[in-house]
Image (cartoon, rainbow, N blue to C red):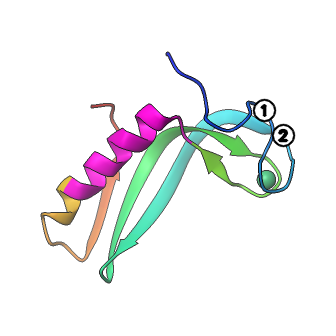
């Protein structure tokens, strides 16, 4: 895996807790629709739960959300996969 978190590695920008590598489930609410992406690789804060994605992952998540948005389902759940 290449790239590293945009945030300073290992420390939460919100609460200064320590982060560790894991996977996150993040709901996106767009125009009264809910699109949930599971298994997003991220650094996750052990204290407040904030997830930090690399910019590559964030871009791929954004593309996935856009594709699901086009389906016009009210609720979508998808598993993250790299583009
Ligand atoms: Zn935190």
Name the image quarter holding the C terminus.
Answer: top left
- Give the residue at mark 1: 10
Q: Nearer the viewer, residue 69 or 37?
A: 69
Q: Are marks 1 and 2 in contact (CB under 8 Å)?
A: yes
Give coordinates of residue 70: x percent, y percent. Answer: 13, 63
Q: Residue at x 24, y 77 (%)?
A: 74
Query: What residue does disc 2 label?
Result: 18
Q: Is residue 25 left or right of residue 74?
A: right
Tell me the residue at 50%/16% (across/down).
2
Q: Is residue 67 left or right of residue 64?
A: left
Q: Quadrant of residue 27?
A: bottom left
Local crowd size for mark 1, using a 10 Å CA cut-off: few (<14), some (14–19), many (≥20):
some
Distance Cα–Cα, label 1 vs label 2:
5 Å
Magenta region? 53-66
Q: Is residue 8 above or below residue 64?
A: above
- In the rendered picture of this protein, how many numbered marks are placed on residues? 2
């Amino acid at each position: 895996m290449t790239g590293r978190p945009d945030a300073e590695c290992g420390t939460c920008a919100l609460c200064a807790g320590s982060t560790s590598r894991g996977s996150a489930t993040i709901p996106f609410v767009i125009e009264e629709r809910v699109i949930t992406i599971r298994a997003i690789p991220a650094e996750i804060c052990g204290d407040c739960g904030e997830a930090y994605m690399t910019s590559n992952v964030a871009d791929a998540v954004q593309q996935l959300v856009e594709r699901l948005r086009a389906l016009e389902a009210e609720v979508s759940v998808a598993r993250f996969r790299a583009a």
